[in-house]
Image (spheres, rainbow, N blue to C red):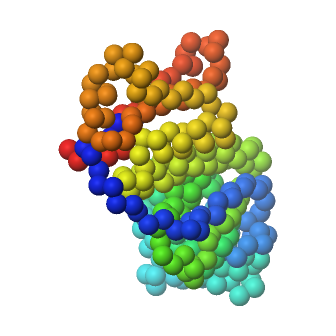
Amino acid sequence: MTTKPKPRRAKAKRSTRPAKTKGLEIDVQSADIIGIDTPALVVNLFRGVKKPGGATGAVDKALGGVITQLIKEGEIKGTTGETTLIHTFGKIKPSRVLVAGLGPKDKFDIQVVRRVSAEVVRFLRRKGISSAATIAHGVPMGIEDGLDPQLCGQAIAEGAHLGLYKFGTYLTNKEDSTTEFGKLTVVELDKTRAKAIEAGVKLGSTVARASIIARDMVNEPANHMTPSRMAEAAQKVAKEQGFKIEILENAEMKKMGMGAFMGVAQGTDEPAKLIVLRYDGDPANPENNLGLIGKGITFDTG
């Protein structure tokens, strides 16, 4: 890791309390959505649909056609990212129903699932709702015209985790009135599809949490996230995830002839670090070997 050029030495003011970042829990249930006991149930609608079908249609029927009526009145259009909250007043177990717009069906894909998932959890957080259940967008349409259940599960998890991301380390007042959204349940009646969705949720949550670690480091000011602190962060990841780690110092890099790398580092009094993280998944499989290289510049103006 190198820095370039020499940064100013002013210290950023860090809060004495950790940022309010509670982890999001996502689980998968094989159940009938009408019977789910939840503060909010998320269903969906494609743009241009006049009479909802599938899971959304079942909820609409249980609510006496209120979704159809709101479509007719133009309040629900089904545009991508649109959110409409409906109170159920005891007609079904969920206290509220949130209709999420998926946009036009011919343009629906995994990216839309990811975006809609993010929009939904942010909307619920703004409303002070801390947990919800959702259908798996794209899965209930069926194998013929639907999306892969595992990919949908992954996209839902990634969208939800990253949609809720906030960097609040340097906020002076952390005691805001925002209720943290803490739990999302993905509901799918078919047990086979539910199992595939669960596998996707697990992978998506892992990918999102890794992205959040990177976001936290990137959002730190340059006078705090030095090569040495980046090395400390890498050591923490290695310890938590069971990776092997090697951190090369100046003397070792000099012996290896890394002149260009060290030349860039001379632009600051912060020592350079070369960080190597290794994970041995299946050493016997040569096709499983993958190397990722990032330049890791912690301060750069040009």
Q: Is residue 2 visible?
A: yes
Please say if 199 is above or below 186. Answer: above
Q: Residue furthest bottom?
A: 89
Expressed as whole percent of the image width and height from the top left, the position of residue 275 reads 48, 31
| Residue for point 52% across, 52% down | 212
Expressed as whole percent of the image width and height from the top left, the position of residue 27 reads 72, 55
Expressed as whole percent of the image width and height from the top left, the position of residue 67 reads 57, 78
| Residue for point 31% across, 35% down | 265
Expressed as whole percent of the image width and height from the top left, the position of residue 55 reads 65, 64
Q: Residue furthest left?
A: 302
Q: Quadrant of the C terminus?
A: top left
Q: Quadrant of the N terminus?
A: top left
Please say if 90 is above or below 18. Answer: below
- Viewer-proximal residue, 154 or 264? 264
| Residue for point 47% across, 72% down | 171
| Left or right of residue 33, residue 180 in this image | left
- Viewer-proximal residue, 109 or 10? 10
Count of picture labels = 0
- Viewer-proximal residue, 130 or 105? 130
Q: Is residue 57 visible?
A: no
Asked which quadrant contains residue 258, the reply is: top left
Please say if 11 is above or below 126. Answer: above
